[in-house]
């Protein structure tokens, strides 16, 4: 009898505790609900239309170079990345063995995306040809990289705004877009309106011509700042620039030269800095830009990055150089 009463008492106590625990859990959930964000997902417009994505996703795969610096500055952890196209610019991901390596865009290991089990995949233009395949593997894939035939500056601002929405960093995103606008306005104001400008890409010790408007990375400087081209012609290779001899540059005699050092962030053996290539060219010694030290070099990481921070820095450097020359 005593044993029966004890068992009944324990059962009653257990039931009471369970009821109390349930009430406490309910109260906790209600409290959390009142202080948590009103939604755990948000609808954004990526390059293919509206798509619902998680807010502040915990497991992120990023494939697009133009978002890497923003994600790095915002301390967003990546679970997988294409280390083959990241060079030496983001060692905290490249050197981290916990970050799975997708490789490069030529022969990517897309199964690493599945293995990473991401909440969100941010695709990119270098991996654009694999979009459909990646989307099948990970339906939670978006593309927000600058779209072709669109103004790159506007596209970078759009991309940054979307990242701010996804990661709940709207204030930080606004600061980035504001800094870009300021750098452009200051550079445009400092430019004298008449000095001729020549944009170049240097790679493998060779000099490439960047066509105004259409040329890789630097072509947009001309319409954005209203620059006067020292050479104004189309280019066959808009991605890496047409070969341009020092003699042709000397004949154009630009007042300013803007240079993208394509190999600057790869850390390869035998790398020759663009500055050495230009300064050691005998034919360029009497060029106005060289004589007046009016040669502006983009940051070495620019070619890998091409993100909003890189353009802001380049416009700022140009603005400072233009202002100093007045």
Image: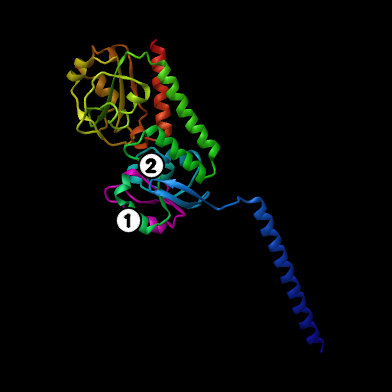
Give the structural element (helix, strand or loop) at label 1: helix
Q: Residues within 10 Å of mark 2 (few under 14, many from 20)?
A: many
Most extreme residue toward the front is 49
Question: Does 265 sit above or below residue 28?
Answer: above
Q: Identify the residue shown where x is 48% and y is 28%.
A: 179
Residue 73 in percent (x, y) is at 49, 38
Q: Which mark identifies residue 145?
A: 2
Range covered by the magenta-colored residues: 96-125
Q: Nearer the viewer, residue 156 or 283?
A: 156
Tell me which label, 2 or 1, sits earlier in the chain.
Answer: 1
Residue depicted at x 37% and y 58%: 137
Residue 59: % across, % down:
47, 53
Q: Any magenta on residue 91?
A: no
On the image, which quarter does residue 300 sit in? top left
Residue 153 at least partly seen: yes
Q: Report the quarter where the C terminus lies.
A: top left
* Residue tagged 1: 133
Q: Quadrant of residue 169?
A: top right
Q: Label 2: state its secondary structure.
A: loop
Residue 301: tell me if it is visible. no
96 lies above or below 17: above
Residue for point 26% across, 16% down: 254
Residue 235 coordinates in the image, percent (x, y): 21, 30
Give the residue at the far top of this rendering.
326
């Amino acid at each position: 009898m005593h044993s029966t009463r004890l068992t009944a008492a324990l059962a009653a106590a257990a039931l009471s505790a369970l009821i109390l625990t349930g009430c406490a859990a309910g109260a906790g959930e209600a409290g959390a609900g009142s202080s948590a964000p009103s939604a755990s997902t948000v609808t954004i417009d990526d390059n293919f239309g509206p798509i619902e994505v998680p807010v502040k996703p915990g497991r992120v795969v990023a494939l697009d170079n133009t978002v890497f610096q923003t994600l790095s500055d915002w301390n967003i952890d990546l679970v997988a990345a294409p280390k083959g196209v990241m060079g030496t610019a983001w060692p905290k991901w490249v050197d981290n063995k916990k970050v799975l390596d997708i490789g490069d865009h030529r022969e990517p290991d897309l199964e690493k995306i599945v293995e990473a089990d991401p909440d969100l995949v941010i695709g990119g233009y270098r991996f654009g040809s694999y979009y459909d395949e990646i989307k099948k593997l990970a339906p939670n894939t978006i593309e927000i990289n600058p779209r072709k035939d669109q103004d790159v500056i506007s596209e970078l601002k759009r991309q940054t705004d979307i990242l701010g929405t996804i990661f709940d960093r709207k204030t930080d995103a606004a600061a980035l877009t504001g800094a870009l606008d300021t750098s452009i306005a200051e550079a445009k104001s400092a430019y004298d309106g008449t000095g001729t400008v020549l944009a170049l890409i240097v790679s493998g010790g060779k000099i490439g011509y960047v066509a105004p408007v259409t040329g890789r990375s630097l072509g947009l400087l001309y319409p954005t700042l209203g620059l006067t081209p020292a050479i104004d012609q189309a280019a066959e290779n808009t991605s890496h620039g047409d070969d341009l001899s020092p003699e042709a540059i000397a004949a154009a005699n630009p007042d300013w030269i803007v240079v993208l050092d394509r190999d600057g962030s790869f850390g390869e053996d035998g790398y020759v800095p663009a500055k050495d290539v230009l300064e050691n060219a005998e034919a360029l010694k009497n060029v106005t830009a060289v004589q007046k030290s009016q040669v502006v070099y983009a940051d070495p990481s620019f070619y890998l990055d091409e993100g909003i921070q890189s353009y802001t820095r380049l416009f700022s450097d140009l603005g400072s150089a233009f202002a100093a020359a007045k």
